Image (spheres, helix red, strand yellow):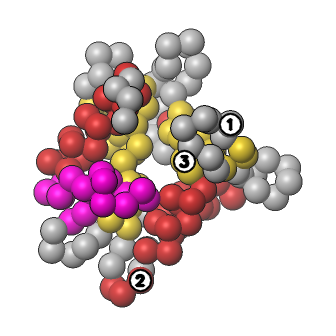
Amino acid sequence: MRDTPNERQGAFAEEWVAREYGLDHAPHEADWYDAVHPSTGTKYEVKSTHRTVDNGATGRFRLWEDQHRSLAGAEGSDGQTAYYAFVLLDVDGEVVDVQRRHPSTVTRILDERELGDGSPWNRAGHQEREGAQHKLPYTEVFDS
């Protein structure tokens, strides 16, 4: 794994959420979640962003279609549930706020943002990861 600023930011957010919610940090257990509640098995996928990114644009959470599908499938199955933990960071990389959202809530947000072809997903074009993504502005999760 490369050690980029985004990867360090993501690892920091994952560890922070695990500590804050009493979760087991398990980033290598599966590719669709980062942490697990030790007694309930609830899965958490952690996403992080800054209010504003380096180029001045509004911060966005990068959601992956395959991860979302797995989280949505886990929500409610076998009495378990799943969450996204959206972490908003300040300019210094400190946690400003965290919002937990069920995948079904995120699906509703995405459905409102479909791209005109009936889908909110588009091709990522990343060399390190194939698949469809959606860049969700933090303002869609947090109050501005």
Residue drawn where x is 58% and y is 19% of the image: 57
Name the residue that disc number 1 marks: 125
Q: Are marks 1 and 2 in contact (CB under 8 Å)?
A: no
Going from N to C along the chain, the mark reached first, 1 or 2, is: 2
Region of the chain picked out in magenta, as a range: 21-37
**Which mark, by number, is residue 63?**
3
Residue 67 on image: x %, y %: 51, 58
Q: Amino acid at mark 3?
A: Leu
Find numbered disc 1 in the image and state the secondary structure of the residue it sits on: loop
Residue 100, quarter of the rendered image = bottom left
Residue drawn where x is 29% and y is 16% of the image: 92
Residue 91, quarter of the rendered image = top left
Name the residue that disc number 2 marks: 77
State which quarter of the image contains the N terminus.
top left
Is residue 11 among what the camera can see? Answer: yes
Q: Residues within 10 Å of mark 1 (few under 14, many from 20)?
A: few
Residue drawn where x is 64% and y is 50% of the image: 131
Cα–Cα gap, marks 2 and 3: 21 Å
Q: Are marks 3 and 1 in contact (CB under 8 Å)?
A: no
Q: Amino acid at mark 1?
A: Gly
